[in-house]
Image: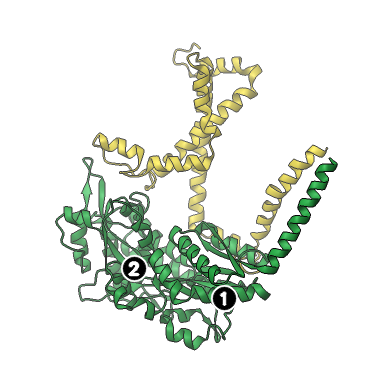
Chain colours: A yellow, B green
C-alpha cells in the first residue's frame, strides 16, 4: 500500500494535474503573465476556424495511417528474423534495440542533421558525391512527411518487436508460422 | 547514532549562525538574463566591478536559454522568487508593466530630464507617466558582415554600396558543387534571423514605402513598395539563386564557417565572430537604395527593478541599476559584446565612429528606426511564413505579402483592441 503511494503521487502531480489544468485553461484566456479570465468556447472557435489546424490535423491522420501498419509489419518481420539469426545474435539484437533506448529528442536532432542540405547533411552529401542534386527532405511538401515517418517507424519498430516478442512467448511459434506462410512467396515457411 | 545526532545538531547550529552573520553583513540581490555568452561574460565583469565598489552587496546572476526565459520570469516574480533586477527586450515592456513584474525607477536617482538629455531618443519608449520603468546599457543596429577571404578570392575589391551592387556581388561569391548544390552562398537568408528587420524597416522604406502607420498599430507594407521589397528579397533565393534558406542550418553558422560571402546581422554578433579563428571578416553599412536612401533597424535590451525587490534589496537594486547604466558599464559592454553605448555621448565618439567594426553600426544608428512590436515572435512568424509559402507552395509574392500583412494586422488588432 505504501509503495503504491509513490506512483499515485507521481501520476497526480505529473500527469493528472497538468492535464486537468490544461483542459481548464482551454476555456480561459491567459498570456502567462496576467491573471486568467474565462473565455467560454472562444479558443475552440478560433482553433476550428483556423485552416492551419485542419491541415495539421489531416497531416497527423496521414502520419498515423501510414506509420502504424508500416511499423507493425516491420516490427514483426524484423523480430522474426532476429530470432532466427544465430550469427552475433546478442550484438545484432542489442544494436537493433538501441533506438528504443535513445531519447526521442536526441534522435530527432540526429535525423535532422542527416536530412540537412549540403554541406552538412549526411544523406545529401552522399548524394552529392555521386553527382546527384540534393533532395529538400524537410523543406518540401512532398518529402517532409515520409522523411519524418522514417525515424519514427524505425524507433517504433524497435520497441514493438521487443514488446510484442516478449508478450506472445507461448504463441509465437504458431503465429510466426502463420505469418511466414502468408508472407512467403512459395507458400512454405 | 547519538554521535551522529550530536554532530548534526552542531552542524545545523553552525550553519544557522553563519547564515545570520552573513545576512547581517551583506545583502544579496539576484540578476536574471537569457544566455548569450558574450552578454553573460560582460555582466560577470560588471558584477565584479560593482561588488568591489560596494562590498556590502553581492549580486548573483542566473541565466536561462532564450526559449524559456520569459516563462521563467513570469512564473518566478509573482511567486516572490527570482530576480531583483531583470533584463527584458524593449518590446516586452508593456507586458511586464501590465503584469506588475517591474516597478518604476526612482526619479531622484534617475531623473527623466537627465535621461532624455543623455540617452538615445528611442529610449523614451521606456517612460510610463513621468517615470522611467527600465533603461538599457547598450543599443544595437544592423550592418553587413562580409568575408574578406571570399571577397579576395572572387576578385571583389569592397563591400557593395547599393542594393543592385549587392546582387552582383552575391552572384560572384556564390559557389556550387559538382551536383549543382550551393556550397557557398553569396549572402545568407532567413526571416527567422535578422532579415525580418531588414525587410520591415530597411527594404520597404528603401523602395519608397512606410512599413507601418498610426504608431506601428497599422500594417502598411502591402503596397507597391512592399511588393518591390519582397521581390528584391525573395529574388535573391528564387531567381538569382545566390542563397538558400536553412543553408548550414542558421545564417550566422554559415557565415562563421566561412561558407557565406555576406551576412546581415546585429552588432551583438561582433563578440562571437571575434572568437572564430581563421575567419577574416569586415563590416559595412547596409547597402543604400538606388536613390541613395539609407535605413536601419535599432533595438535594445533594458534592465529593470522587479516588484519583488523591497527594503534593503531595493536599495541595492537601485545602486546596481545606476552602475549598469553608467558610461563605464557601457564601455565594458561595447568591448565584450560589441553592442553600442546607449548614450550618444559615449557612442558617437570619433574613435568609435571611425572604428572599422563599430563605425558602420554607429553610422547606422543615426538613421535607424525602432519597430514597436506588439508581439515580436508572432510578427516575425508572419514574415517567415510569407517567404515559406513562396518556397513551399509556390505562392505568388503578391498573394503571400497580402496574407502576411493580414496576419500581422490581426496580431496588432488583438493586442491593441
Work out which residue is located at the far top of the displayed protein and give it.
A188
Sequence-earlier tag: 1 or 2:
2
Q: Residue B2 appears in which quarter of the rendering?
A: top right
Give how far across and how far down residue B302 sits, in percent.
49, 72
In 3D space, how far apart are the residues under numbered discs 1 and 2 (Cα atoms)?
32 Å
Q: Residue, x 77% and y 53% (percent of image)?
A: B12
Q: Is residue A130 left or right of residue B303?
A: left
Q: Is residue A137 left or right of residue B127?
A: left
Q: Are marks 1 and 2 in contact (CB under 8 Å)?
A: no
Q: In the rendered view, would you say B221 is above or below A153?
A: below
Q: Which mark is residue B319?
A: 1
Give the number of marks. 2
Give how far across and how far down residue B19 sits, in percent.
71, 61
Q: In the rendered view, would you say B126 is above or below B49?
A: below
Tag 2 secondary structure: strand
Residue depth check, mark 1 versus mark 2: number of the one nearer the observer? 1
Assess disc 2: are there few (<14), some (14-19) or many (≥20) residues with their C-alpha within 10 Å of its C-alpha. Answer: many
Work out which residue is located at the far bottom of the displayed protein and give it.
B113
User: Does any portion of residue A11 appear in the rendered image?
Assistant: yes
Q: Residue, x 31% and y 54% (percent of image)?
A: B255
User: Does any portion of residue B386 appear in the rendered image?
Assistant: no
Q: Nearer the viewer, residue B279 or B263?
A: B279
Residue with the mark numbered 2:
B142
Label 2 chain ID: B
**Quarter of the image that includes the N terminus of chain B:** top right
Tag 1 secondary structure: helix
Assess disc 1: are there few (<14), some (14-19) or many (≥20) residues with their C-alpha within 10 Å of its C-alpha. Answer: some
Give how far across and how far down residue B266 sits, in percent.
36, 65
Amino acid at each position: 500500500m505504501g509503495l503504491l503511494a509513490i506512483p499515485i503521487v507521481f501520476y497526480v502531480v505529473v500527469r493528472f494535474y497538468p492535464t486537468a489544468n490544461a483542459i481548464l485553461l482551454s476555456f480561459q484566456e491567459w498570456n502567462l503573465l496576467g491573471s486568467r479570465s474565462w473565455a467560454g468556447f472562444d479558443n475552440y472557435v478560433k482553433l476550428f476556424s483556423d485552416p492551419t489546424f485542419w491541415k495539421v490535423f489531416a497531416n497527423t491522420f496521414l502520419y498515423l495511417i501510414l506509420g502504424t501498419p508500416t511499423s507493425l509489419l516491420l516490427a514483426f518481420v524484423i523480430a522474426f528474423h532476429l530470432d532466427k539469426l544465430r550469427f552475433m545474435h546478442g550484438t545484432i539484437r542489442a544494436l537493433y534495440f538501441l533506438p528504443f533506448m535513445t531519447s526521442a529528442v536526441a534522435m530527432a536532432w540526429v535525423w535532422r542533421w542527416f536530412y540537412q542540405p549540403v554541406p552538412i547533411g549526411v544523406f545529401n552529401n552522399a548524394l552529392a558525391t555521386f553527382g546527384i542534386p540534393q533532395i529538400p527532405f524537410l523543406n518540401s511538401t512532398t518529402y517532409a512527411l515520409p522523411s519524418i515517418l522514417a525515424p519514427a517507424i524505425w524507433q517504433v519498430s524497435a520497441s514493438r518487436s521487443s514488446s510484442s516478442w516478449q508478450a506472445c512467448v507461448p504463441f509465437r511459434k504458431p503465429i510466426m508460422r502463420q505469418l511466414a506462410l502468408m508472407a512467403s512467396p512459395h507458400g512454405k515457411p | 547514532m547519538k554521535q551522529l545526532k550530536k554532530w548534526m545538531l552542531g552542524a545545523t547550529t553552525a550553519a544557522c549562525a553563519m547564515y545570520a552573520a552573513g545576512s547581517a553583513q551583506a545583502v544579496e540581490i539576484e540578476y536574471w538574463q537569457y544566455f548569450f555568452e558574450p552578454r553573460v561574460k560582460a555582466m560577470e565583469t560588471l558584477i565584479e566591478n560593482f561588488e568591489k565598489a560596494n562590498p556590502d552587496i553581492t549580486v548573483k546572476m542566473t541565466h536561462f536559454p532564450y526559449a524559456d526565459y520569459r516563462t521563467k520570469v513570469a512564473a518566478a516574480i509573482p511567486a516572490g522568487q527570482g530576480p531583483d533586477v531583470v533584463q527584458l527586450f524593449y518590446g516586452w515592456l508593456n507586458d511586464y508593466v501590465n503584469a506588475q513584474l517591474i516597478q518604476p525607477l526612482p526619479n531622484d536617482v534617475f531623473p527623466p530630464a537627465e535621461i532624455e538629455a543623455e540617452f538615445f531618443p528611442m529610449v523614451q519608449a521606456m517612460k510610463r507617466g513621468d517615470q522611467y520603468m527600465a533603461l538599457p546599457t547598450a543599443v544595437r543596429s544592423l550592418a553587413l558582415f562580409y568575408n574578406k577571404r571570399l571577397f579576395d578570392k572572387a576578385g571583389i575589391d569592397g563591400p557593395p554600396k547599393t542594393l543592385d551592387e549587392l546582387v552582383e556581388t552575391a552572384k560572384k561569391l556564390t559557389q556550387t558543387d559538382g551536383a549543382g548544390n550551393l556550397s557557398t552562398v553569396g549572402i545568407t537568408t532567413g526571416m527567422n534571423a535578422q532579415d525580418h528587420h531588414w525587410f520591415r524597416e530597411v527594404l520597404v522604406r528603401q523602395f519608397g514605402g512606410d512599413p507601418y502607420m498610426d504608431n506601428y498599430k497599422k500594417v502598411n507594407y502591402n503596397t507597391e513598395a512592399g511588393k518591390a521589397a519582397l521581390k528584391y528579397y525573395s529574388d535573391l533565393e528564387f531567381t538569382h539563386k545566390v542563397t538558400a534558406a536553412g543553408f548550414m542550418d542558421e545564417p550566422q553558422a554559415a557565415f562563421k564557417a566561412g561558407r557565406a560571402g555576406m551576412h546581415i546581422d546585429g552588432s551583438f554578433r561582433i563578440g562571437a565572430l571575434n572568437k572564430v579563428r581563421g575567419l577574416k571578416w569586415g563590416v559595412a553599412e547596409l547597402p543604400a537604395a538606388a536613390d541613395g536612401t539609407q535605413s536601419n533597424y535599432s533595438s535594445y535590451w533594458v534592465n529593470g527593478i522587479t516588484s519583488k525587490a523591497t527594503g534593503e534589496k531595493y536599495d541595492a537594486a537601485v545602486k546596481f541599476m545606476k552602475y549598469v547604466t553608467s558610461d563605464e558599464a557601457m564601455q565594458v559592454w561595447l568591448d565584450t559584446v560589441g553592442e553600442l553605448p546607449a548614450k550618444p555621448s559615449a557612442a558617437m565618439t570619433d574613435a568609435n565612429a571611425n572604428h572599422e567594426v563599430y563605425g558602420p553600426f554607429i553610422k547606422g544608428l543615426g538613421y535607424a528606426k525602432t519597430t514597436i512590436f506588439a508581439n515580436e515572435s508572432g510578427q516575425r512568424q508572419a514574415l517567415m511564413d510569407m517567404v515559406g509559402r513562396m518556397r513551399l507552395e509556390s505562392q505568388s509574392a503578391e498573394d503571400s505579402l497580402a496574407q502576411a500583412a493580414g496576419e500581422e494586422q490581426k496580431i496588432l488588432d488583438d493586442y491593441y483592441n
